Amino acid sequence: MFPQRLDSIVAYEIAKAMMDGFNRHYRLFRTESARAKHRFETADWHGQQRAQRERIEFYDLRVRECSTRLGREFKGGEQPMEVWHQVKLHYIGLLVDHHQPDLAETFFNSVTTKILHRSYFQNDFIFVRPAVSTEYIENDEPAARPTYSAYYPTHDNMARVLEQIVGDFDLRRPFDNLSRDCGFVDEAIRVRMGEVKLRANFQVQVLSGLFFRNKGAYIVGKVINGFGEEPFALPLLHNKVGKLVIDAALFGEDDLLILFSFARAYFMVDMEVPSAYVQFLRSMMPRKPRNEIYSALGLQKQGKTLFYRDFLHHLRHSTDKFRIAPGIKGMVMLVFDLPSFPYVFKVIKDYYPPQKDTTREQIKGKYLLVKQHDRVGRMADTLEYSEVAFPRARFDDELIAEIEKFAPSQLEISDRDGDGQLEVVLKHVYIERRMIPLNIYLQEAFDLGQGLPAHDSVALRARDQIERGVVEYGNAIKDLVAANIFPGDMLWKNFGITRHGKVVFYDYDEIEYVTDCNFRRVPEPRNEEEEMSGEVWYTVGPKDVFPETFAPFLLGNPSVREFFMRHHAVLLDATFCQMHIDRIGEGHVFDVFPYDRDMRFAPGLTETDVA
């Protein structure tokens, strides 16, 4: 047999093995997502949390399995590049009529880059751009529901149609009073739409999969009337006696953006054609990047792929330089950004000051903890990359000097392609959404109102900004504690303000589980010498926390102190966290839902924590 023919056979078998690996991955991913419905129906909240954590690991496990198989059966890393050219072509052929071609391409990239040397990571060997369109892919499984269903209510029967929509999800747990709840939703839709005429195309389109996260399930869809489209989501919860209720009706892009926020845990939703879900959701949230929608659906590896494509596109169409990020420099992370790009890049330093008793692996562990945990809208998600290449010409010299000084082990500058264009390669980097650091947000308000009479309109606006920042900061701490997370370093600089005015925590090197901490009051001094001592005279264990000692570091500004003590004085009392430790120890699962209390239909029906 001719060598070319042998190479083609080997290439096809490698491509087939890689496709088998991806299909196994997505089958397991989808099965675990589908089981979320049973866990919701049976109120298995700990099982839901465990499944959310474990599902994040599925992808890397399958990539390792596939790489191992290729090495064992085909000596994948030793195959000539001509074979790998053919592998990609055969793989493209296998993507025809596939329901997840975009995800399968990303899986191919992950396996290939694990096997081949990085010098081969060129367009010829990986999918830099999609090779197969995801337009108009539909679920053609026997008896399968389409990606979304359309319903055609009138003014008179809207509540009954809403009951049909809920009933079509076939939840195996009774509702407390479904007709009552659908009446609430009907009224909310009427208020939202106002006195408008129903056009010929009036309809309600609803995605066929329920969106599960922690203790909630969400029906997601949109109301279409004429040229207008109104996105909505209906949260379903358990009430105090274990029956289901529709807790609220969320409307509009802003409500949906908060529901799908990068600071929340990933949803579990059973999707045969994920790209169709993303397309539907993007029509509801046009300002949200596709990469963040994929991540919100639990497909964070696809989110990483799309983010990197967007990033390369942005680099080609911009000329500004990476710089040291504004704000107070961190002791553990070196942070830089590109002013025209709404993200920050974080590199773990090689050296830490003596008070930071930690290691690189411990810091990575903290970031992984956040990735796997319920982020309750208060911890920013991160994208983690290795061996990331940037054009050297786009780096400010001061930034290069900073990396060379604090993280030399993470930096390589070379002409990798031999074309005379230097590249900066970072060994390991985290990427997060850029926010306004809370200390800068507050300082802007201080500066705005400085020297003005208290009744001046500008001074009043500055005072309102301070109050919003302080109230949101305290709410963020309370939500994190409810999720069993203690931030550790609670300084203002470690929190940021999102575009929706939410305060989000983003410095993870000192976080701990609340249940691992020992919250104590400062003991009463036993004598005058202890009372007058400028040093800590009482014993302090490694996990001891004294909340009352936070005040001198946080509340130096009189306005900040006033608002903090008015709204959040309880955070300076050790009993607040201890109460949560006791409840968590009893098996209680707190959940913080992504809408305000005043949006709820009947708050007394459920015992949930709503932010």
Image (cartoon, rainbow, N blue to C red):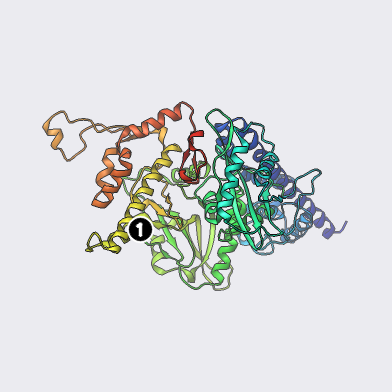
Give the left or right position of residue 581, taking residue 530 as reference.
right
Q: Residues within 10 Å of mark 1 (few under 14, many from 20)?
A: some
User: Would you place residue 54 above or below residue 583 in this image?
Assistant: below
The number of discs equals 1
Element carrying mark 1: helix
Which amino acid, by three-letter code, is at mark 1? Tyr
Any part of residue 109 in sight: no
The quarter of the picture where residue 443 lies is bottom left
> Which residue reaches farthest right?
1
Seen at 46% across and 47% down, the residue is 379
The quarter of the picture where residue 2 lies is bottom right
User: Which one is nearer the viewer's eye here, 470 or 56?
Assistant: 470
Q: How far from the left and from the top, in percent, is residue 461?
A: 32, 60
> Which residue reaches farthest left?
528
User: Would you place residue 103 above or below residue 511 in this image?
Assistant: below
Give the left or right position of residue 82, taking residue 443 as reference.
right
Q: Mark 1 highlights which residue?
A: 441
Seen at 57% across and 47% down, the residue is 187
Q: How far from the left and from the top, in percent, is residue 377?
A: 48, 47
User: Which one is nearer the viewer's eye here, 126 or 170?
Assistant: 170
Any part of residue 32 in sight: yes
Give the left or right position of residue 307, taking residue 143 as reference.
left
User: Which one is nearer the viewer's eye here, 28 or 600?
Assistant: 600
